[in-house]
Image (spheres, rainbow, N blue to C red):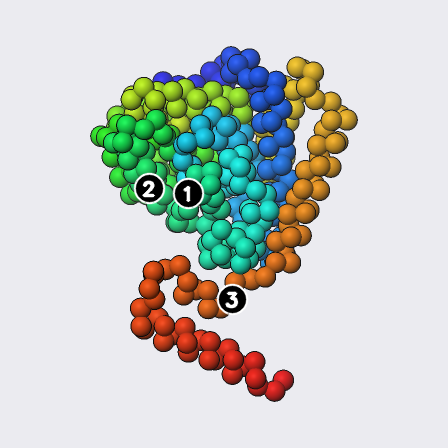
């Protein structure tokens, strides 16, 4: 196993980016990464409010984890597949999923890619190879490994990136998937976002090992631990893993260590520590040092992003919900008799209800 702990500790302070990784990022890409993280933060904070108001069913915040998500997605090639967990909507947006399509997914409208059926799960977008997954923890890991293995069997230079939190490492699917990846040398890039908590369970209750990247040794994978608050470090590490996959050297388990906002909400010192490590603030300081950002450009970006999010959420919030009978669609090529009966009974009941006097 190799380590990029120098990107987390020795090579950078919490306020700065790791110079070795940041220098290899072009001005254009650096600005694009920053803009995507700003969009992710704005959307995330709006969705937190909508969920608390009861206007959307669920939302898992990724505030403080934008660098790990955007950096990993940016390292991929167009032909690669992405399997999201619960917090990586920004990766789908980077891959080209329209913002409005994400909003329709969250509101469960008839215009969403899943036709309103998977609002508890992550968004998916087949045109850019963002796969549809189950919302259950870890279950998508074997699916990603399967796609990667199939690509290797076909001798295609295609990789599969799969995100998950450290809580998923306690699932059987994590072991099954990564063990199979090691045996088959499948080109899978497994990104473990270690923010210290799986809901209310601390990382110390998930493993007795020193971190999660070390688990790669048991599976015969490459293992890397990286500062998940440094978007350029994550980008560099995933790029290297993708290059190894292209050479037939197998998969990589990448542990991206992050510190979400308000993790220590009752501890002012903890909050101050997070503020210094805020991935967006760190990238902003880096851009300012390179002459690529200013207070004025930040104000323009914030206004543009806010307007984009406003439009997308307004469109989705007023869109039609799926018809009740839509639950019978898209399951069978030819609907079985017993489901046809149930559909007809439902339609008859709806007609009867509409005809009853109010």
Q: What's the distance in space between the residues labelled 2 and 3, CA to CA?
A: 30 Å
User: For this view, does 327 lie left or right of residue 31?
Assistant: left
Residue found at x 70% / y 22%: 293
For the point 35% across and 35% down, the residue is 207
Residue under pointer 3: 323
Query: For the residue labelled by badge 2, is the local secondary structure a helix, a strand or a loop?
Result: helix
Circle 3 packing at 10 Å, graded few (<14), some (14-19), many (20+), is: few
In three-dimensional space, the C-alpha distance between marks 1 and 2, rounded to whole angstroms, equals 10 Å
Label pair 1/2, CB-CB below 8 angstroms: yes
Image height of 176 relative to 9, above or below: below
Which comes sooner in the sequence, label 2 or label 3?
2
Q: Which element is circle 3 on?
A: loop
Image quarter of residue 38: top right
**Residue 97 placement (x, y as % from top left):** 53, 41
Quadrant placement of the C terminus? bottom right
Which of the two residues, 315 or 197, is positioned nearer the viewer here? 315
Horizontal side, residue 329 vs residue 153: left or right: right
Q: Which residue is mark 1?
A: 131
Q: Nearer the viewer, mark 1 or mark 2?
A: 1
Q: Which residue is mark 2?
A: 143
Point 44% across, 75% down: residue? 346
- Helix, strand or loop under label 1: loop
| Viewer-side residue, 269 vs 64 | 64
Residue closer to the observer: 270 or 40: 40
Q: Earlier in the sequence, mark 1 or mark 3?
A: 1
| Quarter in which the N terminus is drawn | top left
């Amino acid at each position: 196993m190799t380590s990029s702990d120098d990107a987390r500790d020795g090579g950078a302070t919490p306020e700065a980016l790791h110079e070795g990784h940041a220098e290899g990022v072009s001005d254009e890409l650096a600005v694009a990464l920053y803009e995507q993280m700003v969009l992710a933060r704005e959307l995330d904070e709006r969705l937190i409010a909508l969920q608390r108001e009861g206007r959307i069913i669920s939302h898992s915040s990724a505030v403080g984890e934008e660098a790990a998500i955007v950096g990993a997605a940016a390292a991929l090639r167009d032909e690669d597949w992405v399997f999201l967990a619960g917090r990586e909507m920004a990766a789908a947006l980077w891959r080209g999923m329209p913002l409005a399509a994400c909003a329709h997914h969250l509101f469960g409208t008839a215009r969403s890619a899943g036709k309103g059926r998977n609002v508890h799960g992550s968004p998916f977008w087949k045109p850019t190879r963002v796969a549809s997954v189950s919302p259950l923890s870890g279950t998508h890991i074997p699916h990603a490994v399967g796609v990667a293995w199939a690509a290797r069997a076909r001798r295609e230079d295609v990789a599969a990136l799969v995100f998950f939190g450290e809580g998923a490492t306690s699932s059987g699917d994590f072991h099954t998937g990564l063990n199979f990846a090691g045996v088959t040398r499948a080109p899978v890039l497994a990104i473990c976002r270690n923010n210290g908590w799986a809901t209310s369970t601390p990382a110390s209750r998930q493993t007795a090992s020193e971190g999660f990247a070390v688990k790669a040794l048991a599976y015969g994978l490459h293992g890397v631990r990286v500062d998940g608050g440094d978007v350029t470090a994550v980008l560099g590490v995933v790029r290297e893993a993708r290059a190894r996959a292209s050479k037939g050297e197998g998969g990589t388990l990448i542990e991206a260590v992050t510190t979400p906002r308000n993790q220590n909400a009752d501890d002012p010192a903890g909050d101050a520590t997070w503020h210094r490590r805020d991935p967006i603030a760190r990238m902003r300081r880096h851009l300012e040092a390179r002459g690529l950002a200013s207070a004025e450009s930040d104000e323009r970006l914030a206004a543009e992003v806010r307007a984009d999010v406003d439009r997308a959420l307004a469109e989705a919030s007023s869109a039609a919900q799926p018809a009740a009978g839509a639950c019978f669609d898209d399951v069978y090529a030819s609907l079985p008799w017993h489901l046809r009966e149930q559909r007809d009974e439902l339609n008859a009941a709806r007609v009867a209800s509409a005809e009853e006097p109010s």
